[in-house]
Amino acid sequence: MVPTDSSEPTGDDASETRGSATGAIVRLRRVQHPGRIIAFVAVVIVMLAASFVAGAMLVAPEREAVDNATTRVEPTLFVEERVVAAELQLSAGVVAGASYDIVRGPEYLLGAERSVVSAMRVLPGDLIDYGTVVAEVSGRPVITVPAATPLYRDLQVGAEGADVRALQVMLADLDYRGVTVTGVLDEGTIDAMRRLYTASGYQLSPDTEGKTIRWREFARIPVDHGTLVRAAEVGTVLDGETPLMTVQTAPPTLVARATLLEADRLTVGQEVMVSAGGGAPVSSTVLAIGEFSTDAVSGAGGKQISVALPPSLVADAGQPLTVRSRAPEPTGLAVPLVAVQTDDEGTFVRGFRSAGERAAEAEEGLEESAAAAAEGRIAVEVTAQAGGWVAVAPNDRLRVGMRLGMPE
């Protein structure tokens, strides 16, 4: 018989013993902090849920661009009534006025052997009229007469012709009494000419006792009056090429180049302000507005604007000046510049009505034809542009407060 041990292992000891029978011992341990594990799992679940929600809310840039491109944005451009005009400013230059040279040739004058300036009776800046002794050449006076006086011969009593008539007209205009315009040289005309010479300190043809009018003692000028700008010095020998003097027959002016839109804002007689460099502006007026022409240098089209040169403004020919408009600009229909479009058919804007506006107009009973007039292409005529706004001519389809569409 095999002896038995009454102390056979039981419980945990039995398990350990059974494990030993296989060569390994298995130990089962209890979890010490089960709450922490539960908390960790919960946090992981919350983070996963948050990531899912965030991913669902985010949109890729490409998708956002596509969505924006297909979304119609209602414009906020409106027709207004306002002044659209920046200060008109033009660059101008001084242009010398028209002038006329009085030239004396080498003709011998009453006992003189050559023509020499022996005295100058006027100074630069002096006003020269008809019947004025302006100089003395070889001891004899030079008297101004109208350019229409056809001088070509010496005259004595009994001579007749257009030259006689022209001298009689001049003497009558100068209020010399006793002159009758007949075209025939009579004693009354000779006497008036003697008085003209005497008033200037000379005698009429002393070699003939005042009975002859010498044609070489007169100089023609093309206007009623002019301003002396240059004169030969005393002692100058006149050879027919050197001017005795230069008479300005028109004052210097300011000439500016303007675009068609700029020229349309100016009128003849309008007051403008003129300044040279940093000097104070001086009031002036627009003298003339030329016809449309193309600049030979730049090729730009426009009009030439002539402005009077103020006497108080000291400026030389060629000196740049600035011309500014002073006329108040009227209010009128204006649209934002961004709303203006141009194509082969011309310049236009697009009226805009939202779906809500259409519904409201329908409820108010507005006829569709009238409502449609405020929508779609509306041709406009631009009259001015400044500060992001465009002034347009009156238009039956435009009204203040009307909404406009953005260019497509």
Image (spheres, rainbow, N blue to C red):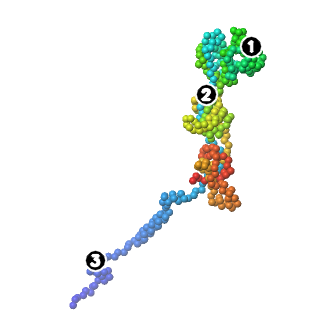
Which amino acid type is shown beneath numbered disc 2?
Ala
Q: Give the Cα distance between marks 2 and 3.
A: 126 Å
Image disc number at residue 36 = none
From the image, tell me which residue sits under label 3. 24
Q: Give the Cα distance between marks 1 and 2.
A: 43 Å
Name the one closer to the observer, 200 or 165: 165
Q: Which quadrant of the structure image shows residue 294?
A: top right
Q: Secondary structure at mark 3?
A: loop
Seen in the picture, residue 100 relative to 33 is either above or below; the reply is: above
- Left or right: residue 211 compared with residue 36: right
- Farthest residue, direction bottom: 1
From the image, tell me which residue sits under label 1. 157
Name the one closer to the observer, 342 or 233: 342
Q: Secondary structure at mark 2?
A: loop
From the image, tell me which residue sits under label 2. 96
Q: Which quadrant of the structure image shows residue 236?
A: top right
> Residue 328 appears at what percent x and percent y?
67, 40
> Residue 408 appears at what percent x and percent y?
57, 53
